[in-house]
Image (tube, grey):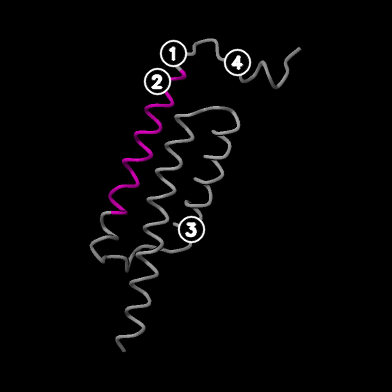
Amino acid sequence: MTTLRTIFEYENAELALYASLLGAVLSTVATIPQAWKASRGSTADLHLATFVAHFISAIVWAFYGFLIKGWILFFECVIVSILNFYVCLCIVRERCASCHVK
């Protein structure tokens, strides 16, 4: 009988480790250019709702990683959530600055 516990038991733990490391690196690397662009004040083509959704989903995935003791997932999502929160702050800062300039 297949149970939820047996679904989460890996037959190849080493492969699971390498897959999670690759996913963590790719996810983090994909977020860094957006944070870099936002830090330079170029947020006109970035959508706040998208980054808020990414931020919330990263927090939820970090919580899940914590619950299952998936530390690679947990730390990757914490880093990505910080980067997405930073981008959100930059977008709001730029939008507020453009409102006050008029």
In the picture shown, does residue 38 fall above or below 7? below
Amino acid type at mark 2: Tyr
Q: Position of residue 23 (x, y in %)?
A: 40, 31
Describe residue 53's horizontal placement relative to residue 88 as left or right.
right
Which residue is located at x 52 percent, y 39 percent? 62
Describe residue 33's horizontal placement relative to residue 80 as left or right.
left
Q: What stretch is highlighted in magenta?
A: 16-35
**Mark 3 secondary-structure assignment:** helix
- Label whose residue precedes the other's in the sequence (1 or 4): 4
Disc 4: which residue:
9
**Label ID, residue 52:** 3
**Mark 1 secondary-structure assignment:** helix
Quarter of image, res 20: top left
Does the stretch in magenta take in 28? Answer: yes
**Label ID, residue 18:** 2
Amino acid type at mark 4: Glu
> What's the magenta bit mostly, secondary-structure-wise?
helix
Disc 1: which residue:
14
Q: Spatial distance from mark 2 to mark 3, Cα to Cα?
A: 29 Å
Amino acid type at mark 1: Glu
Q: In which quarter of the image is the N terminus?
A: top right
In the picture shown, does residue 92 fall above or below 11? below
Q: Where is residue 56 in the image (x, y as percent from the top left)?
A: 53, 52
In the picture shown, does residue 16 fall above or below 70? above
Q: Spatial distance from mark 1 to mark 4, Cα to Cα?
A: 12 Å
**Mark 2 secondary-structure assignment:** helix
Q: Spatial distance from mark 4 to mark 3, Cα to Cα?
A: 33 Å
- Label whose residue precedes the other's in the sequence (1 or 3): 1
CB atoms of marks 2 and 1 within 8 Å: yes
Q: In which quarter of the image is the C terminus?
A: bottom left
Which residue is located at x 49 percent, y 11 percent? 12
